[in-house]
Image (cartoon, rainbow, N blue to C red):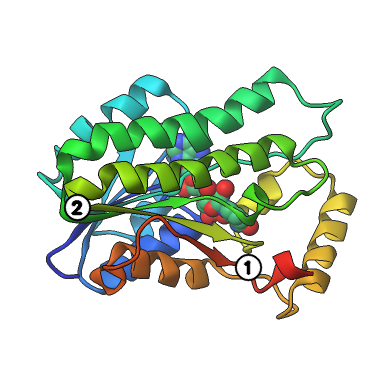
Amino acid sequence: MNTKTFLITGGTTGIGLATAQHLRAQGAKVIVTGRNPETLASAKKILSDAAFLRSDSGDLAAAQALGNEVKTFADHLDGAFLNAGVGTFQPIEAATPKNYDDMFNVNVRGLYFQLQSLLPLLGNPSSVVFTSSIAGSIAYAGSSIYSASKAAVISLGKTLAVELAPRGIRVNVLSPGPIDTPIIKKMGLPADQLKGFEETIVAKSLLKRWGTSDEVARAARFLLSEDSSNITGTELIIDGGVRLN
Ligand SMILES: NC(=O)c1ccc[n+]([C@@H]2O[C@H](COP(=O)([O-])OP(=O)(O)OC[C@H]3O[C@@H](n4cnc5c(N)ncnc54)[C@H](OP(=O)(O)O)[C@@H]3O)[C@@H](O)[C@H]2O)c1
């Protein structure tokens, strides 16, 4: 990995940050994006030798400009982990067009046009990994918009694996189950519902615990590396068996 260069969107906290740390530990060069200046600043302290770009995945022009911005740090990429994502839960009666646009613009449109802009930089061979969620294939009350956005990511992963295979670009999808990261507190659930949600997750997990960012990062590293050289168009689920219960 020590001659490789990877881009990670949403690499300032949670799963993206843990993946950046794993890739750095193996000597790879990493370029990290985030939107929030505070989390960008704290990630810079942890990943002092990484390159950072402030780029809002929900902004179409920024997504389309990402490839050119990355070029200021690297003339090619061995892989891209398109991981930035947002999720709020609300019943359909309470959902607003803003909720819908916020989730689809970051989780689906941003990822798609970021990848389009990165294509000239992606080598042959190279590896693209999208972060979806088990919510993309399992129904949870209140998660309709988030789940639909993550289902779209699973679909894009399969289609683009077919479309980009002739260019030597593998495309795979990681679908985490519940992972203990900052996103959980951003879901918009009141404290009592959040506590109930956390307890339900532990009860449903076959391992009786939440997953960790580090566990997802190890899977991301595998899919980004040549260790997964014969794997494309797949969805790797990391959920402690939650979906089975
Ligand atoms: N944790 C889970 O249980 C779980 C389960 C299934 C799937 N996932 C997915 O895993 C991915 C990573 O989430 P996480 O759990 O690691 O949560 P997280 O700690 O909240 O990380 C989200 C990352 O995405 C970035 N991000 C969010 N909106 C952005 C935007 N508009 N532009 C650029 N960056 C943006 C955040 O940066 P800022 O701080 O700048 O916003 C942060 O770096 C997401 O796609 C999420 O949907 C998580």
Q: Is residue 55 left or right of residue 210?
A: left
Residue ID at (18%, 46%): 167
Percent of width and height locating residue 63: 35, 29
Q: As shown in the figure, which amino acid type bears the numbered disc 1?
A: Asp
Q: Name the residue under label 1.
A: 239
Does residue 24 appear anywhere in the picture? yes
In the image, residue 85 sits, relative to residue 67, either above or below, namely below
Percent of width and height locating residue 9: 38, 45
> Which mark is first along the chain, 1 or 2?
2
Percent of width and height locating residue 188: 75, 40
Label 2 CA crowd tier, 10 Å (few <14, some 14–19, many 20+) = some
- Total marks placed: 2
Q: In this view, does 27 lie to the left or right of 162?
A: left
Mark 2 → mark 1, Cα distance in angstroms: 29 Å
For mark 2, give the secondary structure.
loop
Please state which of the two labelled residues, at mark 2 or mark 1, is closer to the viewer: 2
Disc number at residue 35? none
Quadrant of the rendered structure where residue 239 is?
bottom right
Quadrant of the rendered structure where residue 134 is?
bottom right
For mark 1, give the secondary structure.
loop
